Amino acid sequence: MSLLVWNPEWDTGIALIDAQHRILLGQVDVLMTAIHENDVDRHMPSLLAFLADYVDEHFQMEEERMAATGYPGIEGHRAIHDGMRRDVASLVERFEVNSQTLNEEVLDFLMDWLVKHINGEDRRLARHLHQWADANPRTQP
Ligand SMILES: [Fe+2]
Ligand SMILES: [Fe+2]
């Protein structure tokens, strides 16, 4: 059973970004289902391991595209990513100390990511990438 479905408004129209965002949503759904079924302890270690890898790869991919296309909002967007990198590192660290306290916090963090970051910063970036692609039809960022 899926508790969370993709909101088409979250689509950026950039295939790789959307594919990775959907993978993130899948993990949020796993966590929501685990909370619903009172089975978080079994899922949290793999979820946090996933998040640690994900912030590394996904943010780096977005930042490379920003740099390659001269995105004017790069500094602000990267600073937000850096804050989220620190948040994930802190969640991972604190989970090792006390797993019980984190369930709601991890869920809030992920929902904020989906709703605010993807819907805000990432969509602004995508608008820039589309404009850049229109202006540079033969080049891949
Ligand atoms: Fe993103
Ligand atoms: Fe982003």
Image: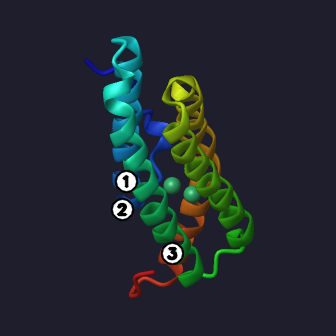
**How many numbered marks, from 0 up?**
3
Q: Is residue 81 visible?
A: yes
Quadrant housing residue 20: bottom left
Instruction: Tell me the amino acid under the disc marked 1.
Output: Gln
Callout 1: CB less than 8 Å from ligand 1: yes
Rendered image: mark on residue 20: 1
Q: Nearer the viewer, mark 2 or mark 1?
A: 1
Residue at 64% in and 55% down = 86
Residue at the extreme front of the image, as rendered: 97
Q: Residues within 10 Å of mark 1 (few under 14, many from 20)?
A: some
Residue at 51% in and 23% down = 100
> Relative to 88, does residue 64 appear above or below in the rendering?
below
Task: Name the spot of residue 119 as percent of width and height, x first.
Answer: 58, 44
Callout 3: CB less than 8 Å from ligand 2: no
Residue at 25% in and 17% down = 1
Residue at 38% in and 49% down = 49
Quickly name the residue at label 3.
65
CA gap, disc 2 to disc 3? 11 Å
Task: Name the spot of residue 66 as percent of width and height, x first.
Answer: 58, 74
CA gap, disc 1 to disc 3? 14 Å
| Mark 2 or 3, nearer chain start | 2
Instruction: Tell me the amino acid under the disc marked 3.
Output: Arg
The answer to the question of whether label 2 and label 1 lie on touching residues, with beta carbons closer than 8 A, is yes
Q: Quadrant of ligand 2?
A: bottom right
CA gap, disc 2 to disc 1? 6 Å
Q: In the picture provided, is 112 more to the left or to the right than 99?
A: right
Between 10 and 110, the residue placed more toward the observer is 110
Quickly name the residue at label 2.
16
